Amino acid sequence: MRKIMVLAALVVIGIVLLYAVGKMPPMNSRNTPDKTHVVPRYLNEGESEGGAKNIITGVILNYRGYDTMGEVTVIFSALCATIALLDREKRKVSRSGVDASGVRASVIVRTVVRFLVPIVVFFAAYMILHGEATPGGGFQGGAIIGASVIIFTLVFGLPESTRRMPLKARVPFESIAMLGFLAMGFIGIAFGVNFLTYVLPGLHGSLVDTIRSQMLMVIEIGIGIGGGLVFTSIVLAMVREDEYELQPDIPQP
Amino acid sequence: MSVSAHHPVLLVAVPLFFAALCPIWGMWRREACFPWALLGVVTTGFFAWSLIGKVTSTRAVTYNAGGWRPPWGIQIRIDFLSLLLICMITGVGLMVLVYSWRYVGKELPPEKITYYYTLVLLILTAMLGFSITGDLFNFFVFMEIFSITSYALVAIVGGPRAVRAAFKYLLMGATSSITVVLAIALLYSATGSLNMLDISNRLKTTSYLPVAGVALVFFIAAFSVKAALFPVHVWLPDAHSIAPSPISALLSALVIKMGVLGIFRILFTVYGHTFSDLSSTWSHVAGVVSWAAALAIVLGSIMAIMQRDLKVMIAYSSVAQIGYILLGITMLSPLGMVGGLYNMLAHAMGKACLFLVAGSIIYKHGLRRIEDMRGLGRTMPVTAGAFALASLSIVGLPPSAGFVAKWYILWGCFQKGNFAFVVIVLLGSLLSAIYCFRVVYYMFFAGARERGATFDEAPLTMYFPAAVLSAGTLFFGVFAGLVIPFLSNACRAVLMR
Amino acid sequence: MNFSRIFHNLNYAVSALLFLMGLYTVTVKPNLIKKLIGLNIMETSVFLLIVSLGMIPDGQAPIVTNGVRPSMMVNPIPQALILTGIVVAVSTTAVALSLCIRIHEKYDTLDAFKIHGRGGL
């Protein structure tokens, strides 16, 4: 009975949505409202006004920087929410590298992961720093860092992860994304222009562009480190190693 | 440019700064979090109140983030409704924070305290940002911040009922959030802009109006979930009753008003009332919301009467009061709209007070059932008195702010000739009287059994905020003239667009 | 219902269907993790819709390089929007999974009917 009502509601919503799709501007065409109103200025002036070759980075950090500040706050609040619900991870004096079956990961996996993680982190750093000129940026790099921490924790266990990224070192840097935005924003206010303006008055010529790029870089790095640490902390809080029964180390063939 | 010109953005930047540093203080010394949070809210309150003069003397205060003019950049636009909301948020937020100190110290495990205060600072930041922005996508981003923090704050207590209620709240909230994004996408494809006023202009000349109509329907459906309008209110009773009491106050008083603001902004700022070609869809949507609100008033009050747990009763009362607010807004008469928006103010103060009182009773005696409230009028006179005073506002008796609000709503109904709504508003007051005064009866007039007559009040930092909030409902009832004229002008302007 | 336009806007139509599938999963499936997967499907479908808005014929990435003229670039705004959207979706999923962990601790099950009683959700 309930399923029938739900299906009926879904059919109605589906018809409404498909009706809207039918009335929407044609896909893959140049003359739709969304491409002719605001976008030409972004595409034409994006590099000179925005300060980044990657126009999307220019839109995210410069034209719509206030939104991105909100976005790093969303990530930070997800971290706070997760910690409030799960509490921080407790350092366990357990065997490292056990999964739910109590068996340690095989030597192949351990070796490959130990080799790859530094390379992946290096790649993440490249992503973050080069976000202005290539596809990439702060969030992308932060997500890669988070993914590398996840695989490291899965293979080597919580104590090893926590040893490399201790809590006391992580907490101050989790807020760094928001603090980066706020710092750059307040610099603008100190110079007399609006919050998050990177073109500071009273500077000459090429100094304006340099300062702007440096400010963008600071924010980008802040997002990368902050985002990466947030994902790391969320994952570490979710690991529940105390629930697993430990088995003696089975000799690997 | 002096600092005062930057107050609009400081409303968001300052509490965000305090929220970002709160965990670091917590790592050093857990007890430092409360004073830090208090300092943050007081500073933000200063910025909010300093904007009163500017906003009331001009139509709206605008601020372009990043220096880019809209629609290329994000514009903050504080009109009178935004001003009302930011004053409510900082005022009620301050009271709830002061109250939290003792309550959370006792009722929450110590390791959660740091992140409790961080989450409260974040939720206040988000609501402030949500109230002042003029950009539709920015609207969504801040909405997500207060949504995510509220899911966690509901479950922070940790028991089985709490996590269950929070999960239901999360599912419904997240579904509605993604529906908002869908609607934004549809509207963007039709107009090409993300700035609310710019979209409103572009809708007049776009050739994709049906898409905008569908987007309108999705927007209202999604924001109705956030506002807990009947029939998508089902997440509210569980979530608001099981949350820690200061959080219940924050949620009922402020967070659901954000859903109401969402509906208001979509209907009136983005779409506009007299706008020709979409007017039939628009009127139908507004009509459906007004009838759902009317049902919310009656059914919410009936459900409240049926409850034996005090906090669940207060939660259902919120469902009913949101009905009043939305009925006033969507009735499309200037008087009704003034009443609906004034009820936002009255309900925020009154409902926060009721939840803080319920929390004080839980703190002192661990009691949640209404029949166990006997004799509290004598042992906790200030707390019980605050409850009685706030009840006047919830029911709508003079000289409370709630009376002023419901009076205007009634006149709006008469003006529109809709006598069914008149009956419903009056019926709602009658039903509210039943459930509110039942509690007052138990507190003051039922025999005090073993409790005796000794004065055993809650701590000062807990009864004082409740008293201030209830005094607020009285103050804004007697001195409604401070707010109503500006509200009237704003509503008339909105309905002329 | 303009069927030829719907078929032309194929990405949008598929996005709508995915949205419905996600909504079905959220409402009907009893397992909490499946509900979250349904939520993620809904979110992804909306991102598909948004990104497809930006397409132009023979479009290039909006990065200033040699040989790419601004008129050849796809719309950068949808991409900025979904960057934010993806972050928001991940955050919501993280909080939801934390709640699932706690629910499993308290109820020893992830079945909505067992947790909520007769109604489920």
Image: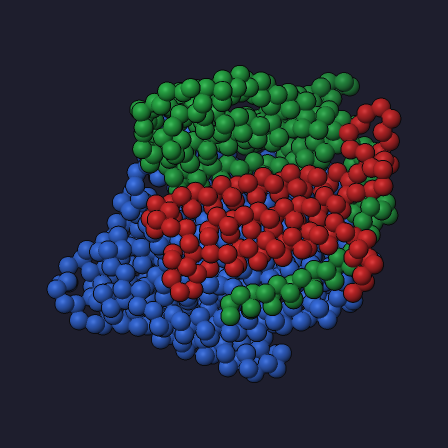
Chain B: drawing colour: blue
Residues B384 and B73: in front is: B73
Identify the residue at image location x=60%, y=48%. C41
Residue in view at x 80 percent, y 49 percent: A27
Picture coordinates of residue A150, whole percent (x, y) = 49, 29
The residue at the far front in this view is: A253
Q: Residue at the spot x=76%, y=18% of the render?
A: A206
Q: Is residue B90 left or right of residue B438?
A: right
- The green-coloured chain is labelled A
Asked whether residue B363 is in view, the answer is yes
Q: Which chain is red?
A: C
**Which quadrant of the structure image shows residue B269?**
bottom right
Residue B159 against residue A138 in the figure, above or below? below
Q: Residue at x 60, y 27 (%)?
A: A141
Q: Can you say which quadrant of the picture contains the C terminus of chain A?
A: top left
Q: Position of residue B148 (x, y in %)?
A: 49, 46
What percent of the width, then of the height, locates residue B247?
A: 40, 51
Q: Which quadrant would residue B277 be assigned to in this image?
A: bottom right
Residue B402, percent across and down?
45, 68
Where is B139 relative to B73, above or below? below
Residue B245 horizontal side relative to residue B285, left or right:
left
Q: Is residue C24 left or right of residue B298?
A: right
